[in-house]
Structures are given as structure tokens and as C-alpha cells.
Amino acid sequence: MGYVASALVLATFSVRRPVSLRLLAMASNVAFIAYAAMTGIGPVLALHVVLLPVNALRLTQALRPHVRVAAAVTFQPVMRSASGHVSADRPMPDPPPYTRPIRPRS
């Protein structure tokens, strides 16, 4: 069990994506909890009992990227008047819908 837990920790260092990292870290926490409980290693058990909810919290944060996007979307630029002054009461118009460029036939 200790070798499996160690292999899972080693695997966490090879992944690049935050969700995969947290899932592997949580799996290694569970494996180390089982190993420490079987062998009676209190400090390892305590460490991974604390790290498991930390990794779970970070996983939920990594799975919610729309919160950051929603905050960025609420920004609304304003138009400048002909004299260059910003007019807060006249927001910029919506951009035109995307149209595909016309290609000449050959």
C-alpha cells in the first residue's frame, strides 16, 4: 500500500492540469491514510487527513472557472465623445455579429 501511495504522489508531479493534479493528490491522500492506519504511523495519518480536504477544496475551485469569467464579463467599456472625453452614460454598442468573409470563386 505504501508503494501505491508513493507512486500516486510521483504521478502528481507529472501532470500539468490542475484537475488531474488534485484528483491524483486526493487518491494519494486516501492511499496514505490507509497505509498509515494499517501500519500505525500517526504523523503520516494526520498529515493526509488534513491534506485530503485541502485538495478537495482546491479541486472544487479548479472546477469552477466560470466564476472568474463572469467577473471579467461584467466590465462594460464606455465610448469617448468626439472631443475625447469619456461619456459614462453612453456605453459602447454591441459589436456586429460575425460574418464569414466572401471568397471569390476561382
Image: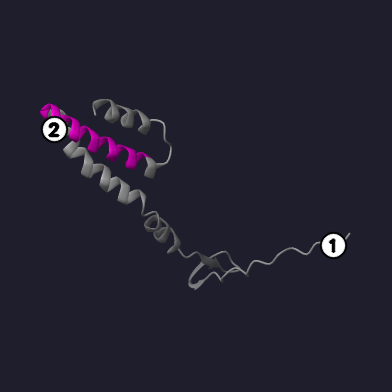
Above or below, 83 against 10 in this view is below
Image x and y of residue 25, in percent: 30, 37
Q: In this view, does 58 lie to the left or right of 46?
A: right
Locate the N terminus and report the quarter of the image it occupies: top left
Q: Residue furthest bottom?
A: 89
Is residue 2 magenta-colored?
no
User: In the rendered structure, which amino acid carries the disc numbered 1?
Assistant: Pro
Nearest the eye: 24 or 18 = 24
Magenta-highlighted residues? 21-42
Q: Which residue is drawn at 21% across and 38% down?
A: 51
Helix, strand or loop at label 2? It is helix
**Which residue is tagged 2?**
37
Q: In this view, does 67 lie to the left or right of 35?
A: right
Q: Which residue is drawn at 10% across and 29% down?
A: 42
The structure's colour scheme is one colour
Q: Which residue is drawn at 19% across and 30% down?
A: 35
Q: Which marked residue is nearer to the observer: mark 2 or mark 1? A: 2
Q: In this view, does 21 lie to the left or right of 93?
A: left
Helix, strand or loop at label 1? It is loop
Q: Badge 2 local density, few (<14 within 10 Å), some, or many (20+)? A: some
Locate the C terminus and report the quarter of the image it occupies: bottom right
Is residue 32 magenta-colored?
yes
What mark, if any, has residue 22 been given in the picture?
Answer: none
Q: Which residue lies furthest to the right in this view?
A: 106
Image x and y of residue 80, in percent: 55, 66
The answer to which image quadrant residue 55 occupies is: top left
Image x and y of residue 26, in percent: 28, 40
> For the residues marked 2 and 1, what is the alpha-carbon distance in whole angstroms?
72 Å
**Which residue is tagged 1?**
104
Above or below, 39 against 98 in this view is above
Image x and y of residue 18, in percent: 38, 42
- First reached walking from the N terminus: tag 2 or tag 1: 2
